[in-house]
Amino acid sequence: MRVFFCKFNDPVYVKLEKIDILVKVADDKTADVILNELKEYANDIEIELIRKSIRAIGSIILRVDKSAKRAVEILSELVSTGQPLCLQESVIVARDIFRKFPNKFEGLI
């Protein structure tokens, strides 16, 4: 799994593909590690990488129910940074979270 973590000198298109692969290999055991890695990517300067990593966090929430609590914590941290793109993408992901887990993660609002 760690083979697919992004390196600082990877081109953006490679990083985006690695994120797709990380979402696909996420399961109960690896979800926390992958979510922490995606959180780091969301603090990058590359717009597409930020967008893709936050959406990947949302995808992992939908695939691995046990990761939902940690993923919501990460989304809350990203929203609190005040970066407009993080806020925008987190709202889109939050919509999907509320659909899957109604009345459970209202603190995200």
Image (cartoon, rainbow, N blue to C red):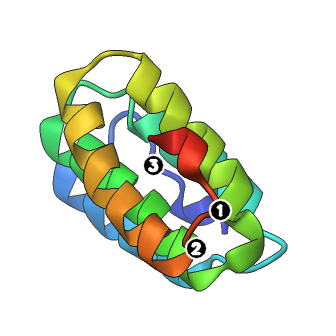
Camera-near label (3 vs 2) is 2
Q: Which residue is mark 1?
A: 104
| Residue pointed to by mark 2 | 101
Q: Is residue 11 left or right of residue 19?
A: left
Q: Earlier in the sequence, mark 3 or mark 2?
A: 3
Tell me if I can see residue 31 in this picture: yes
Q: Residue shown at 45%/76% (left/top)?
A: 21
Q: Residue at left 66%, top 79%? A: 64
Question: Is mark 3 in CB contact (under 8 Å) with mark 1?
Answer: no
Q: CA distance from mark 1 to mark 2?
A: 6 Å
User: Residue 94, which numbered label?
Assistant: none
Per the model, the C-alpha gap separating discs 3 and 1 is 32 Å
> How far from the left and from the top, in percent, is residue 39?
52, 39
Q: Is residue 9 left or right of residue 97?
A: left
Q: Position of residue 15 (x, y in %)?
A: 32, 55
Residue 11 at least partly seen: no
Q: Is residue 105 above or below residue 75?
A: below
